[in-house]
Image (tube, rainbow, N blue to C red):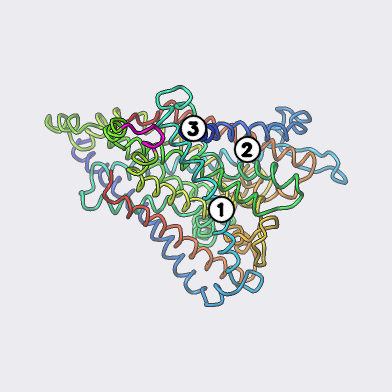
Amino acid sequence: MGGQLFKNFSFLSATLAFFMLVGIFSVLFNLAQESLYTFGFDFLYTEIWEPGEDDEGGIFGGYIPVVGTLLSTLIAMILATPIAMGIAIFLTEIAPDKIVKPFGVAIELLAAIPSIIYGMWGLFYFAPIVQSIFGGNGVGLLTAGIVLAIMVIPFMAAITRDSMNTTPDVLKESAYAIGATKFEVIKDVVMPYSKGGIIGSIILSLGRALGETMAVAFLIGSVMSIPNKITDPTTSIPVLLANNFAEAQDLELSSMYYLALILFVVSFSVIALAKFYFLGRKKH
Amino acid sequence: MNRLVLNKIVMILSTISAFIGLGFLFWILITLSYKGIASIHLSTFTKDLVEGGIRNLLVGQFTMALIATVIAVPLGVLAGIYLREYGHGSKFASVTRTLSDVMTSAPSIVIGVFVFALMVDPVGSFNGWAGIVALAIMMIPIIIGTTDNMLALVPQELREAGIALGGSKHKIIVQIVLKAAKVGVTTGILLSFARIIGETAPLLFTSANNQFFTMDLSDQFPSLTVSIYNLATYPDAESRELAWAASFILTMIVLLINLLGRYFTRNKH
Protein backbone atom coordinates (compact mmCIF):
# COMPACT_ATOMS: atom_id res chain seq x y z
CA MET A 1 0.00 0.00 0.00
CA GLY A 2 1.22 3.49 -0.92
CA GLY A 3 0.80 4.89 2.57
CA GLN A 4 2.91 2.24 4.23
CA LEU A 5 5.59 2.56 1.57
CA PHE A 6 5.70 6.32 2.05
CA LYS A 7 6.01 5.90 5.80
CA ASN A 8 8.80 3.34 5.43
CA PHE A 9 10.78 5.54 3.05
CA SER A 10 10.41 8.46 5.44
CA PHE A 11 11.60 6.31 8.30
CA LEU A 12 14.63 5.11 6.34
CA SER A 13 15.54 8.69 5.46
CA ALA A 14 15.24 9.68 9.10
CA THR A 15 17.72 6.97 10.10
CA LEU A 16 20.25 8.55 7.71
CA ALA A 17 21.38 11.18 10.19
CA PHE A 18 22.19 8.41 12.63
CA PHE A 19 24.01 6.30 10.04
CA MET A 20 26.05 9.24 8.82
CA LEU A 21 27.30 9.92 12.34
CA VAL A 22 28.05 6.29 13.14
CA GLY A 23 29.54 5.84 9.67
CA ILE A 24 31.90 8.79 10.03
CA PHE A 25 33.00 7.72 13.49
CA SER A 26 33.61 4.06 12.61
CA VAL A 27 35.40 4.79 9.33
CA LEU A 28 37.72 7.32 10.99
CA PHE A 29 38.30 5.05 13.98
CA ASN A 30 39.03 2.08 11.77
CA LEU A 31 41.51 3.90 9.55
CA ALA A 32 43.21 5.52 12.54
CA GLN A 33 43.91 2.08 14.10
CA GLU A 34 47.50 1.81 12.89
CA SER A 35 48.40 5.18 14.35
CA LEU A 36 46.33 4.55 17.49
CA TYR A 37 48.23 1.31 18.17
CA THR A 38 51.63 2.78 17.40
CA PHE A 39 51.34 6.03 19.33
CA GLY A 40 48.37 5.61 21.66
CA PHE A 41 47.54 8.70 23.70
CA ASP A 42 51.18 9.88 23.54
CA PHE A 43 50.11 11.13 20.11
CA LEU A 44 48.61 14.13 21.86
CA TYR A 45 51.88 15.12 23.57
CA THR A 46 54.29 14.42 20.73
CA GLU A 47 55.60 17.46 18.89
CA ILE A 48 57.31 15.54 16.09
CA TRP A 49 55.74 14.97 12.68
CA GLU A 50 58.34 13.14 10.62
CA PRO A 51 57.98 10.44 8.01
CA GLY A 52 60.61 7.69 8.29
CA GLU A 53 63.22 6.67 5.69
CA ASP A 54 61.63 5.59 2.39
CA ASP A 55 58.25 6.42 3.89
CA GLU A 56 58.54 3.45 6.25
CA GLY A 57 57.29 4.12 9.79
CA GLY A 58 58.17 7.55 11.09
CA ILE A 59 57.00 9.42 14.15
CA PHE A 60 53.81 11.39 14.12
CA GLY A 61 52.40 13.47 16.94
CA GLY A 62 49.39 15.74 17.00
CA TYR A 63 50.55 18.17 19.68
CA ILE A 64 51.25 21.13 17.38
CA PRO A 65 48.00 21.06 15.36
CA VAL A 66 45.98 20.37 18.52
CA VAL A 67 47.54 23.35 20.32
CA GLY A 68 47.16 25.51 17.20
CA THR A 69 43.48 24.61 16.94
CA LEU A 70 42.83 25.35 20.61
CA LEU A 71 44.75 28.64 20.67
CA SER A 72 43.24 30.07 17.48
CA THR A 73 39.78 29.12 18.73
CA LEU A 74 40.49 30.66 22.13
CA ILE A 75 41.57 33.98 20.58
CA ALA A 76 38.48 33.95 18.39
CA MET A 77 36.14 33.32 21.32
CA ILE A 78 37.69 36.02 23.51
CA LEU A 79 37.24 38.58 20.74
CA ALA A 80 33.89 37.39 19.39
CA THR A 81 31.91 36.96 22.61
CA PRO A 82 31.71 40.60 23.78
CA ILE A 83 31.04 41.93 20.28
CA ALA A 84 28.37 39.31 19.57
CA MET A 85 26.69 40.11 22.89
CA GLY A 86 26.81 43.81 22.03
CA ILE A 87 25.19 43.18 18.65
CA ALA A 88 22.45 41.05 20.24
CA ILE A 89 21.76 43.74 22.86
CA PHE A 90 21.72 46.41 20.19
CA LEU A 91 19.24 44.47 18.05
CA THR A 92 16.90 43.47 20.87
CA GLU A 93 16.97 46.49 23.17
CA ILE A 94 18.45 49.56 21.55
CA ALA A 95 17.86 49.78 17.82
CA PRO A 96 14.64 51.42 16.66
CA ASP A 97 12.24 49.03 14.90
CA LYS A 98 13.03 50.48 11.50
CA ILE A 99 16.70 49.59 11.75
CA VAL A 100 16.37 46.14 13.34
CA LYS A 101 15.27 44.33 10.19
CA PRO A 102 17.94 45.56 7.73
CA PHE A 103 20.61 45.34 10.41
CA GLY A 104 19.62 41.79 11.24
CA VAL A 105 19.70 40.83 7.56
CA ALA A 106 23.13 42.42 7.13
CA ILE A 107 24.54 40.48 10.07
CA GLU A 108 23.05 37.26 8.71
CA LEU A 109 24.52 37.94 5.27
CA LEU A 110 27.89 38.25 6.97
CA ALA A 111 27.31 34.70 8.21
CA ALA A 112 26.45 33.49 4.71
CA ILE A 113 29.74 34.56 3.10
CA PRO A 114 31.75 31.41 2.30
CA SER A 115 34.73 30.85 4.56
CA ILE A 116 37.18 30.82 1.65
CA ILE A 117 36.24 34.46 0.99
CA TYR A 118 37.15 35.36 4.57
CA GLY A 119 40.45 33.64 3.92
CA MET A 120 41.17 35.58 0.71
CA TRP A 121 40.18 38.88 2.25
CA GLY A 122 42.05 38.12 5.45
CA LEU A 123 45.25 37.21 3.64
CA PHE A 124 45.40 40.20 1.33
CA TYR A 125 43.72 42.92 3.38
CA PHE A 126 43.71 42.01 7.03
CA ALA A 127 47.06 40.26 7.51
CA PRO A 128 49.07 43.35 6.47
CA ILE A 129 47.18 45.43 9.03
CA VAL A 130 47.85 42.91 11.79
CA GLN A 131 51.48 42.87 10.71
CA SER A 132 51.87 46.64 10.87
CA ILE A 133 50.32 46.79 14.35
CA PHE A 134 51.67 43.67 16.04
CA GLY A 135 54.71 42.78 13.93
CA GLY A 136 55.46 39.25 12.76
CA ASN A 137 54.79 37.89 9.28
CA GLY A 138 51.18 38.89 8.94
CA VAL A 139 50.00 35.32 8.93
CA GLY A 140 49.92 33.51 12.26
CA LEU A 141 47.81 32.65 15.28
CA LEU A 142 46.57 36.18 15.91
CA THR A 143 45.42 36.88 12.34
CA ALA A 144 43.71 33.49 12.15
CA GLY A 145 42.06 34.10 15.52
CA ILE A 146 40.76 37.56 14.60
CA VAL A 147 39.31 36.49 11.26
CA LEU A 148 37.84 33.41 12.93
CA ALA A 149 36.19 35.79 15.40
CA ILE A 150 34.72 37.86 12.56
CA MET A 151 33.29 34.63 11.13
CA VAL A 152 31.61 33.40 14.31
CA ILE A 153 30.31 36.81 15.49
CA PRO A 154 27.21 36.85 13.25
CA PHE A 155 26.42 33.24 14.10
CA MET A 156 26.76 33.82 17.85
CA ALA A 157 24.88 37.12 17.69
CA ALA A 158 21.96 35.56 15.81
CA ILE A 159 21.40 32.77 18.36
CA THR A 160 21.91 35.09 21.34
CA ARG A 161 19.47 37.57 19.86
CA ASP A 162 16.85 34.84 19.33
CA SER A 163 17.10 33.68 22.90
CA MET A 164 17.06 37.25 24.27
CA ASN A 165 13.93 37.85 22.23
CA THR A 166 12.13 35.10 24.14
CA THR A 167 12.13 37.22 27.31
CA PRO A 168 8.48 38.14 27.95
CA ASP A 169 7.82 41.86 27.58
CA VAL A 170 5.84 41.83 30.84
CA LEU A 171 9.00 41.00 32.79
CA LYS A 172 10.96 43.78 31.16
CA GLU A 173 8.14 46.27 31.56
CA SER A 174 7.83 45.50 35.27
CA ALA A 175 11.51 46.23 35.71
CA TYR A 176 11.26 49.47 33.75
CA ALA A 177 8.23 50.41 35.84
CA ILE A 178 10.26 50.33 39.04
CA GLY A 179 12.84 52.60 37.47
CA ALA A 180 15.46 50.20 36.13
CA THR A 181 17.75 51.46 33.37
CA LYS A 182 18.07 49.55 30.09
CA PHE A 183 21.36 48.08 31.21
CA GLU A 184 19.82 46.90 34.48
CA VAL A 185 16.92 45.31 32.61
CA ILE A 186 19.39 43.50 30.35
CA LYS A 187 21.64 42.44 33.23
CA ASP A 188 18.96 41.43 35.73
CA VAL A 189 16.01 40.37 33.57
CA VAL A 190 17.00 39.51 30.00
CA MET A 191 20.36 37.85 30.73
CA PRO A 192 19.12 35.56 33.53
CA TYR A 193 16.05 34.65 31.48
CA SER A 194 18.04 33.73 28.37
CA LYS A 195 21.16 32.45 30.13
CA GLY A 196 20.89 28.95 28.65
CA GLY A 197 20.59 30.26 25.11
CA ILE A 198 23.48 32.65 25.51
CA ILE A 199 25.86 30.03 26.93
CA GLY A 200 24.63 27.62 24.25
CA SER A 201 25.39 30.11 21.48
CA ILE A 202 28.92 30.63 22.81
CA ILE A 203 29.63 26.90 23.02
CA LEU A 204 28.10 26.26 19.62
CA SER A 205 30.28 28.96 18.07
CA LEU A 206 33.26 27.37 19.78
CA GLY A 207 32.38 24.06 18.12
CA ARG A 208 32.17 25.80 14.75
CA ALA A 209 35.46 27.62 15.23
CA LEU A 210 37.28 24.37 16.12
CA GLY A 211 36.41 22.82 12.76
CA GLU A 212 36.76 25.88 10.56
CA THR A 213 39.15 25.10 7.74
CA MET A 214 39.48 27.43 4.80
CA ALA A 215 39.78 30.84 6.44
CA VAL A 216 42.32 29.48 8.90
CA ALA A 217 44.21 27.70 6.12
CA PHE A 218 44.93 31.03 4.48
CA LEU A 219 45.89 32.78 7.67
CA ILE A 220 47.54 30.58 10.27
CA GLY A 221 50.75 30.11 8.31
CA SER A 222 50.57 26.30 8.01
CA VAL A 223 53.90 25.66 9.71
CA MET A 224 54.53 22.66 11.95
CA SER A 225 55.95 24.59 14.86
CA ILE A 226 54.88 25.65 18.33
CA PRO A 227 54.08 29.37 18.41
CA ASN A 228 56.16 31.29 20.97
CA LYS A 229 54.45 34.60 20.34
CA ILE A 230 50.85 35.30 19.48
CA THR A 231 51.88 36.48 16.00
CA ASP A 232 53.86 33.30 15.21
CA PRO A 233 52.66 31.00 12.45
CA THR A 234 51.57 27.49 13.38
CA THR A 235 48.95 25.04 12.10
CA SER A 236 45.65 23.51 13.16
CA ILE A 237 44.02 20.12 12.67
CA PRO A 238 41.70 21.18 9.81
CA VAL A 239 44.51 23.08 8.10
CA LEU A 240 46.97 20.19 8.32
CA LEU A 241 44.29 17.91 6.87
CA ALA A 242 43.44 20.37 4.10
CA ASN A 243 47.05 20.77 2.99
CA ASN A 244 48.64 17.37 3.59
CA PHE A 245 45.94 14.72 3.80
CA ALA A 246 45.80 13.85 0.12
CA GLU A 247 49.56 13.20 -0.17
CA ALA A 248 49.95 11.18 3.02
CA GLN A 249 50.68 7.45 2.95
CA ASP A 250 50.56 4.53 5.39
CA LEU A 251 51.32 5.52 8.98
CA GLU A 252 51.19 9.23 8.17
CA LEU A 253 47.79 8.80 6.53
CA SER A 254 46.60 6.82 9.53
CA SER A 255 47.81 9.63 11.80
CA MET A 256 45.82 12.08 9.68
CA TYR A 257 42.72 9.95 10.26
CA TYR A 258 43.59 9.97 13.96
CA LEU A 259 43.61 13.79 13.89
CA ALA A 260 40.32 13.85 11.98
CA LEU A 261 38.85 11.51 14.59
CA ILE A 262 40.01 13.76 17.44
CA LEU A 263 38.51 16.80 15.71
CA PHE A 264 35.25 15.00 14.99
CA VAL A 265 34.82 13.65 18.53
CA VAL A 266 35.72 16.95 20.19
CA SER A 267 33.54 19.14 17.99
CA PHE A 268 30.69 16.62 18.15
CA SER A 269 30.83 16.64 21.96
CA VAL A 270 31.00 20.42 22.13
CA ILE A 271 28.13 20.93 19.70
CA ALA A 272 26.02 18.18 21.28
CA LEU A 273 26.59 19.74 24.72
CA ALA A 274 25.40 23.09 23.40
CA LYS A 275 22.35 21.68 21.62
CA PHE A 276 21.27 19.11 24.20
CA TYR A 277 22.03 20.90 27.40
CA PHE A 278 21.74 24.60 26.74
CA LEU A 279 19.70 25.22 23.65
CA GLY A 280 17.28 22.28 23.71
CA ARG A 281 14.96 22.34 20.73
CA LYS A 282 12.22 24.84 20.43
CA LYS A 283 9.08 23.03 21.52
CA HIS A 284 6.27 23.52 19.10
CA MET B 1 29.63 54.68 39.27
CA ASN B 2 26.41 56.45 38.54
CA ARG B 3 23.98 53.87 37.22
CA LEU B 4 22.76 56.18 34.48
CA VAL B 5 26.30 56.73 33.27
CA LEU B 6 26.96 52.98 33.35
CA ASN B 7 23.79 52.46 31.34
CA LYS B 8 24.94 55.01 28.77
CA ILE B 9 28.36 53.34 28.47
CA VAL B 10 26.91 49.88 27.89
CA MET B 11 24.44 51.20 25.33
CA ILE B 12 27.21 52.98 23.46
CA LEU B 13 29.47 49.91 23.52
CA SER B 14 26.65 47.72 22.19
CA THR B 15 25.93 50.16 19.39
CA ILE B 16 29.61 50.26 18.52
CA SER B 17 29.67 46.44 18.38
CA ALA B 18 26.80 46.45 15.94
CA PHE B 19 28.60 48.91 13.73
CA ILE B 20 31.81 46.88 13.93
CA GLY B 21 29.86 43.88 12.57
CA LEU B 22 28.33 45.97 9.83
CA GLY B 23 31.71 47.56 9.12
CA PHE B 24 33.31 44.20 8.43
CA LEU B 25 30.49 43.21 6.07
CA PHE B 26 30.97 46.36 4.03
CA TRP B 27 34.75 46.18 4.23
CA ILE B 28 34.72 42.66 2.82
CA LEU B 29 32.09 43.43 0.18
CA ILE B 30 33.80 46.64 -0.95
CA THR B 31 37.29 45.15 -1.29
CA LEU B 32 35.79 42.11 -2.96
CA SER B 33 33.88 44.23 -5.48
CA TYR B 34 36.81 46.54 -6.06
CA LYS B 35 39.28 43.72 -6.69
CA GLY B 36 36.78 41.40 -8.32
CA ILE B 37 35.14 43.71 -10.85
CA ALA B 38 38.52 45.02 -11.98
CA SER B 39 39.64 41.46 -12.67
CA ILE B 40 36.58 40.29 -14.58
CA HIS B 41 36.76 40.25 -18.36
CA LEU B 42 34.50 38.63 -20.91
CA SER B 43 37.08 35.88 -21.30
CA THR B 44 36.70 35.06 -17.60
CA PHE B 45 33.38 33.46 -18.47
CA THR B 46 34.22 32.02 -21.88
CA LYS B 47 37.55 30.35 -21.13
CA ASP B 48 38.43 27.43 -18.90
CA LEU B 49 40.90 27.53 -16.04
CA VAL B 50 43.72 26.25 -18.20
CA GLU B 51 43.37 29.36 -20.38
CA GLY B 52 42.83 31.78 -17.51
CA GLY B 53 39.01 31.72 -17.21
CA ILE B 54 36.49 30.14 -14.88
CA ARG B 55 33.88 28.70 -17.28
CA ASN B 56 34.63 25.07 -16.45
CA LEU B 57 34.82 25.90 -12.73
CA LEU B 58 31.39 27.52 -12.62
CA VAL B 59 29.85 24.66 -14.57
CA GLY B 60 31.63 22.11 -12.37
CA GLN B 61 30.68 23.73 -9.08
CA PHE B 62 27.03 24.08 -10.09
CA THR B 63 26.88 20.55 -11.50
CA MET B 64 28.10 19.05 -8.24
CA ALA B 65 25.91 21.28 -6.06
CA LEU B 66 22.81 20.62 -8.19
CA ILE B 67 23.22 16.84 -8.25
CA ALA B 68 23.90 16.92 -4.50
CA THR B 69 20.64 18.87 -4.12
CA VAL B 70 18.74 16.30 -6.20
CA ILE B 71 20.02 13.57 -3.86
CA ALA B 72 19.63 15.49 -0.61
CA VAL B 73 16.18 17.04 -1.12
CA PRO B 74 14.02 13.88 -1.21
CA LEU B 75 15.99 12.25 1.63
CA GLY B 76 16.01 15.38 3.77
CA VAL B 77 12.37 16.28 3.20
CA LEU B 78 11.19 12.68 3.82
CA ALA B 79 13.24 12.51 7.01
CA GLY B 80 11.79 15.84 8.13
CA ILE B 81 8.30 14.51 7.40
CA TYR B 82 8.96 11.40 9.44
CA LEU B 83 10.22 13.38 12.42
CA ARG B 84 7.26 15.76 12.46
CA GLU B 85 4.32 13.73 11.11
CA TYR B 86 4.97 10.11 12.06
CA GLY B 87 7.52 9.93 14.82
CA HIS B 88 6.72 13.18 16.62
CA GLY B 89 6.95 12.75 20.37
CA SER B 90 8.80 9.44 20.13
CA LYS B 91 12.24 8.89 21.64
CA PHE B 92 13.57 7.94 18.19
CA ALA B 93 12.42 11.22 16.68
CA SER B 94 13.87 13.39 19.41
CA VAL B 95 17.26 11.64 19.33
CA THR B 96 17.39 11.73 15.52
CA ARG B 97 16.42 15.38 15.55
CA THR B 98 19.29 16.28 17.86
CA LEU B 99 21.82 14.12 15.99
CA SER B 100 20.85 15.69 12.70
CA ASP B 101 21.04 19.11 14.32
CA VAL B 102 24.57 18.35 15.53
CA MET B 103 25.50 17.16 12.02
CA THR B 104 24.68 20.61 10.61
CA SER B 105 27.64 21.98 12.55
CA ALA B 106 30.03 19.05 11.97
CA PRO B 107 33.42 20.15 10.60
CA SER B 108 33.17 20.02 6.82
CA ILE B 109 36.78 18.91 6.44
CA VAL B 110 35.98 15.73 8.38
CA ILE B 111 33.17 14.97 5.94
CA GLY B 112 35.74 15.34 3.16
CA VAL B 113 38.05 12.88 4.94
CA PHE B 114 35.17 10.43 5.41
CA VAL B 115 34.13 10.51 1.76
CA PHE B 116 37.78 10.23 0.68
CA ALA B 117 38.01 6.98 2.65
CA LEU B 118 34.78 5.66 1.13
CA MET B 119 34.87 6.83 -2.47
CA VAL B 120 38.33 8.06 -3.46
CA ASP B 121 40.79 5.71 -1.78
CA PRO B 122 39.10 2.51 -3.04
CA VAL B 123 39.01 3.63 -6.69
CA GLY B 124 42.40 5.34 -6.53
CA SER B 125 41.45 8.71 -7.99
CA PHE B 126 39.57 11.86 -7.10
CA ASN B 127 36.15 11.95 -8.73
CA GLY B 128 33.15 14.20 -9.11
CA TRP B 129 30.77 11.71 -7.50
CA ALA B 130 32.76 11.82 -4.26
CA GLY B 131 32.42 15.62 -4.24
CA ILE B 132 28.68 15.29 -4.80
CA VAL B 133 28.27 12.82 -1.93
CA ALA B 134 30.29 15.05 0.42
CA LEU B 135 28.07 18.03 -0.45
CA ALA B 136 24.91 15.93 -0.07
CA ILE B 137 26.04 14.79 3.39
CA MET B 138 26.40 18.44 4.38
CA MET B 139 23.05 19.34 2.92
CA ILE B 140 20.78 16.56 4.26
CA PRO B 141 20.85 17.56 7.95
CA ILE B 142 20.12 21.20 7.06
CA ILE B 143 17.09 20.21 4.98
CA ILE B 144 15.88 17.80 7.70
CA GLY B 145 16.00 20.66 10.20
CA THR B 146 14.20 23.26 8.10
CA THR B 147 11.54 20.81 6.87
CA ASP B 148 10.88 19.68 10.42
CA ASN B 149 10.55 23.28 11.62
CA MET B 150 8.38 24.38 8.72
CA LEU B 151 5.95 21.46 9.09
CA ALA B 152 5.66 22.37 12.77
CA LEU B 153 4.25 25.75 11.75
CA VAL B 154 1.35 24.15 9.86
CA PRO B 155 -1.78 24.49 12.05
CA GLN B 156 -3.03 21.24 13.53
CA GLU B 157 -6.56 22.12 12.31
CA LEU B 158 -5.49 21.59 8.69
CA ARG B 159 -4.48 18.01 9.48
CA GLU B 160 -7.72 17.46 11.37
CA ALA B 161 -9.72 18.82 8.44
CA GLY B 162 -7.95 16.30 6.22
CA ILE B 163 -8.76 13.47 8.58
CA ALA B 164 -12.40 14.59 8.72
CA LEU B 165 -12.55 14.36 4.94
CA GLY B 166 -11.41 10.77 5.25
CA GLY B 167 -7.94 11.34 3.77
CA SER B 168 -5.29 8.73 4.46
CA LYS B 169 -2.27 9.87 6.47
CA HIS B 170 0.20 10.09 3.59
CA LYS B 171 -2.33 11.89 1.38
CA ILE B 172 -2.88 14.45 4.12
CA ILE B 173 0.86 14.92 4.50
CA VAL B 174 1.60 15.31 0.81
CA GLN B 175 -1.50 17.19 -0.32
CA ILE B 176 -2.25 19.35 2.70
CA VAL B 177 0.62 19.70 5.15
CA LEU B 178 3.49 19.82 2.68
CA LYS B 179 1.50 22.15 0.44
CA ALA B 180 0.89 24.52 3.33
CA ALA B 181 4.59 24.49 4.23
CA LYS B 182 5.74 24.77 0.61
CA VAL B 183 7.30 28.22 0.81
CA GLY B 184 9.22 27.49 4.01
CA VAL B 185 10.52 24.13 2.83
CA THR B 186 11.60 25.58 -0.54
CA THR B 187 13.39 28.43 1.18
CA GLY B 188 15.19 25.92 3.41
CA ILE B 189 16.37 24.07 0.32
CA LEU B 190 17.47 27.33 -1.31
CA LEU B 191 19.47 28.40 1.74
CA SER B 192 21.12 25.00 2.10
CA PHE B 193 22.06 25.23 -1.59
CA ALA B 194 23.62 28.64 -0.92
CA ARG B 195 25.59 27.06 1.89
CA ILE B 196 27.05 24.16 -0.11
CA ILE B 197 27.76 26.07 -3.32
CA GLY B 198 30.43 27.99 -1.40
CA GLU B 199 31.98 25.00 0.36
CA THR B 200 35.64 24.22 -0.21
CA ALA B 201 36.83 21.87 2.51
CA PRO B 202 34.62 18.87 1.60
CA LEU B 203 35.79 19.09 -2.03
CA LEU B 204 39.56 19.37 -1.49
CA PHE B 205 40.20 15.64 -1.62
CA THR B 206 36.97 14.32 -3.05
CA SER B 207 36.39 16.02 -6.40
CA ALA B 208 39.71 17.89 -6.10
CA ASN B 209 39.95 20.12 -9.16
CA ASN B 210 40.33 20.04 -12.91
CA GLN B 211 41.80 22.68 -15.19
CA PHE B 212 39.83 21.45 -18.15
CA PHE B 213 36.17 21.37 -19.01
CA THR B 214 34.67 18.01 -18.20
CA MET B 215 31.31 16.46 -17.50
CA ASP B 216 32.81 13.10 -16.58
CA LEU B 217 31.94 12.66 -12.92
CA SER B 218 34.24 9.66 -12.55
CA ASP B 219 37.20 11.95 -13.17
CA GLN B 220 38.69 14.84 -11.16
CA PHE B 221 36.05 17.51 -11.37
CA PRO B 222 36.48 21.28 -11.77
CA SER B 223 35.62 23.28 -8.65
CA LEU B 224 35.41 27.04 -8.30
CA THR B 225 36.16 27.10 -4.59
CA VAL B 226 39.11 24.69 -4.70
CA SER B 227 40.51 26.76 -7.58
CA ILE B 228 40.26 29.95 -5.53
CA TYR B 229 42.30 28.30 -2.81
CA ASN B 230 44.95 27.17 -5.29
CA LEU B 231 45.06 30.37 -7.32
CA ALA B 232 45.36 32.65 -4.29
CA THR B 233 48.56 30.95 -3.22
CA TYR B 234 50.28 31.19 -6.62
CA PRO B 235 52.80 34.01 -6.77
CA ASP B 236 51.87 35.46 -10.17
CA ALA B 237 49.52 38.43 -10.47
CA GLU B 238 47.26 36.83 -13.09
CA SER B 239 46.39 33.89 -10.86
CA ARG B 240 45.57 36.22 -8.01
CA GLU B 241 43.38 38.38 -10.22
CA LEU B 242 41.50 35.32 -11.34
CA ALA B 243 41.10 34.29 -7.70
CA TRP B 244 39.58 37.70 -6.93
CA ALA B 245 37.25 37.51 -9.90
CA ALA B 246 36.14 34.02 -8.87
CA SER B 247 35.68 35.09 -5.23
CA PHE B 248 33.56 38.05 -6.23
CA ILE B 249 31.32 35.95 -8.49
CA LEU B 250 30.96 33.24 -5.84
CA THR B 251 30.03 35.74 -3.13
CA MET B 252 27.46 37.45 -5.35
CA ILE B 253 25.86 34.09 -6.15
CA VAL B 254 25.71 33.09 -2.48
CA LEU B 255 24.36 36.44 -1.29
CA LEU B 256 21.78 36.64 -4.08
CA ILE B 257 20.41 33.18 -3.26
CA ASN B 258 20.26 34.19 0.41
CA LEU B 259 18.39 37.41 -0.35
CA LEU B 260 16.04 35.49 -2.66
CA GLY B 261 15.26 33.07 0.19
CA ARG B 262 14.58 35.96 2.51
CA TYR B 263 12.34 37.61 -0.09
CA PHE B 264 10.20 34.46 -0.36
CA THR B 265 9.65 34.31 3.38
CA ARG B 266 9.34 38.09 3.92
CA ASN B 267 5.78 37.87 5.20
CA LYS B 268 6.23 34.80 7.36
CA HIS B 269 7.21 34.53 11.03
Q: Name the residue nearer the viewer: B155 or A101.
A: B155
Q: Amino acid at mark 3?
A: Met
Task: Depth check: give the residue in front, A45 or B5.
Answer: A45
Q: CA distance from mark 1 to mark 2?
A: 35 Å
Chain under label 2?
A: A
- Mark sitting on residue B67: 1
Nearer the camera: disc 3 or disc 2: 3
The range drawn in magenta is B166-173
Locate residue A96, reporting x and y percent: 20, 49
- Residue that carries the numbered disc 2 in the rendered image: A66
Q: Which residue is mark 3?
A: A1
Between discs 3 and 2, the one toward the N terminus: 3
Task: Kindly indicate whether the residues beneath marks 3 and 2 are on one polypeptide chain.
Answer: yes
Tell me whether the residue at label 3 lies in contact with that at label 1, contact meaning CB atoms closer than 8 angstroms: no
**The residue under label 2 is which amino acid type?**
Val
Name the side, left or right, on which A22 lies relative to A48: left
